[in-house]
Image (cartoon, grey):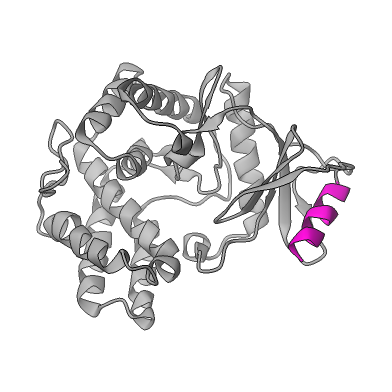
Amino acid sequence: MEHDCIQEALANYNINASEIELLRHNENLTYRVGKDYLLQIHEPAEGFTADFFYDGFDRIEIYKAELAFQEYLKNRGMQIREAVENRWGERITKLHNGTYVTLSKWIEGESLVKLELNDEICYQIGGMLACLHQNAKGFRASPVKSYDKEHCECTRKRIQALENLKLSTEYSAIMQKCCDHAGTVLEKAQDEFHMIHGDLSVSNILQTPGGLVPIDFSFFGMGHPMYDLAVLFGNISGLVRRQQMAEGYRNAGGTIRYDVLDACFILSLLDCIGIHYEQWGKQEWFLPRMVRWHKENLEPYVQGERIYADDFYLLHVQSTG
C-alpha cells in the first residue's frame, strides 16, 4: 500500500525515480526521491496523534497556509525548501485514498540530529531562530492554528482524555493545572504573537554550506516566539548550550521573556506528551521520565515557581543543570 501511494504521488509530478529512501515517519511519511526531491505523504505514524491540535480546522487549508508561509520566508531571503507544483499547477496533491502529498526541492545538508553539537552551532541556532522570527512578523494567513489560551485548553482536554489510556489521575490533574496557568500567561502576552515554526527540534534543522536551515513546518502557527525557544531548550540539553542559543538569539535581535518562556516550556512538554503518549507509554523509560517531569517541572510550575533562572539554569533539576 505504501509503495502504491508513492508511485501514485510521483505520477502526479511526472517523476520517475529509481532511488526512494524513507527518511522518517512521524506526522508525515518523508522520503528522499532521487537526488533532487523530498516527498511528504501526510499520513501520521501509528500512535502519533496531533488531531487535538487541529480540531475544527480543514487540514488542506492548513497545508496551503504552511506552504504560503515557507514561500513568504523564502521571498524574504531565507533558505527554505521550495514546493514543487504537480502537473496541474497545484502544490498539494490528493491521492485516491484521500491522503494529501506535497513535493519540494531537496536541500543538501545534514540534520543536526546526526551531528555533534558544540557552542558555536548552538549560538548559530539562536541567531537563525531570531532571523526566522523577524522575517515571520509580516505574514498573515487564515485559517491557522494558534498556540494561545485556546490551544492550552485543547491540550488540557487531550491530557484528560489520556486517563482512558492509563495516565494516572494524579499526574493528569497537575498537568491540567499547568495548561490553565500557561494559558493565563499566554493570554496576557498575545499582542507579541506572530508566526512561529512550532516544532524546532534538532531533527528539523539542517546544516548546509549556506548556514542553518529550518525545515518541516508542519506545526507552524501563530504563537509567542518563546514557544520555539522552549522547544529547542527541551530538545537540546545542557546549561551552556541553552546559554549559547539565548546569546545568539539576543545578539540577532530577539527578546527573551522569562515568564512566557516558562509557560511555553511547560506547554511544549505537555503537547509532546499529548502527541506521543500512545507510543511513549509502551516504553520502559517513560514512567521514570514522567516522575522526573513532574518533580522537576510540572509541580514547581503549578506552585508558582520559576522554571528557568535568569542564566537559563533549570532551577529544579538536580542532576543535569
Q: Nearer the viewer, residue 294 or 76?
A: 294
Give how far across and how far down residue 274 sits, in percent. 39, 64
Give how far across and how far down residue 61 sits, in percent. 65, 52
Relative height, residue 23 to residue 140 (above, below): below
> Does 279 sit left or right of 139 as displayed?
left
> Does 275 sit left or right of 92 as displayed?
left
Q: Nearer the viewer, residue 168 or 119?
A: 119
**Residue found at x 50% / y 44%:** 220
**Residue found at x 60% / y 34%:** 70
**Can residue 309 be seen?**
yes
Quadrant of residue 170 in the image? bottom left
**Would residue 7 be counted in the magenta stretch?**
yes
**Residue found at x 39% / y 65%:** 280
**Can residue 196 be seen?**
no
Which image quarter holds the N terminus? bottom right
Quadrant of residue 159 in the image? bottom left
Most common secondary structure along the magenta stretch? helix
Please provide the residue range marked out in magenta: 1-12
**Would residue 278 be counted in the magenta stretch?**
no
